[in-house]
Amino acid sequence: MKKLGLIACRFFSLLTVIAMSPMVQADAAHPDFNNDSELTQYLLRTDLVLSRVASSCQASTVSRSADKIPHVQDFQVKLDCMIKDNPEEDLDCPRYKIDVEGTIENHIHATARKIELTLVCFA
């Protein structure tokens, strides 16, 4: 009976190690880039510039174009966002229209290649 308990304990320990491995966790965390919301959230979370600048984004629209390069798809995302830690918040409107152009290289990576910010309102 003790032997069976020891085997069960080792089995569950092995399952825990496998479930917690980075490969399994990363695979479960892959966004679906065919979903507009997931593509937008991925860019806002992983792009160096967008993650540091954009906050409280709304009204996103996403368009995709046909593959010009095999297995690489172009996209354009239009956002309406507040700017994080705007030093001129009392002097100017912190809301910007953000246009992002980029590529989806594979099922786990998309890259913003051009980011344009346009002030939406005036003081």
Image (cartoon, helix red, strand yellow):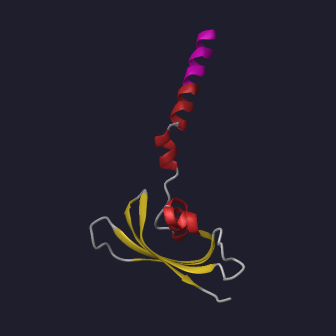
Q: At 59% across and 21% down in the image, what residue appears?
A: 8
> In terms of depth relative to the viewer, which is nearer, 6 or 90?
90
Q: Quadrant of residue 52?
A: bottom right
Image location (x, y in percent) of residue 78: 52, 79
Say whether residue 2 is magenta.
yes
- Res 24 seen here: yes
> In terms of depth relative to the viewer, which is nearer, 106 or 84?
84
Give the residue at the far right of this rendering.
Answer: 90
**Residue 48 against residue 1 in the figure, above or below:** below
Q: At 56% across and 17% down in the image, what residue appears?
A: 7
Count of labels in the image: 0
> In terms of depth relative to the viewer, which is nearer, 1 or 73?
73
Give the residue at the far bottom of this rendering.
Answer: 122
Q: Quadrant of residue 109?
A: bottom left
Image location (x, y in percent) of residue 37: 55, 69
Indicate left or right for 13 with 91 as reference: left
State which quarter of the image contains the C terminus.
bottom right
**Residue 78 against residue 50 in the figure, above or below:** below
Q: Which residues are magenta?
A: 1-11
Image location (x, y in percent) of residue 82: 64, 75
Q: At 42% across and 63% down in the image, what residue appears?
A: 110
- Res 1 seen here: no
State which quarter of the image contains the N terminus.
top right
Q: At 55% across and 61% down in the image, what residue appears?
A: 45
Q: Which secondary structure class fits the magenta region best?
A: helix
Say whether residue 9 is magenta.
yes
Image location (x, y in percent) of residue 99: 49, 78
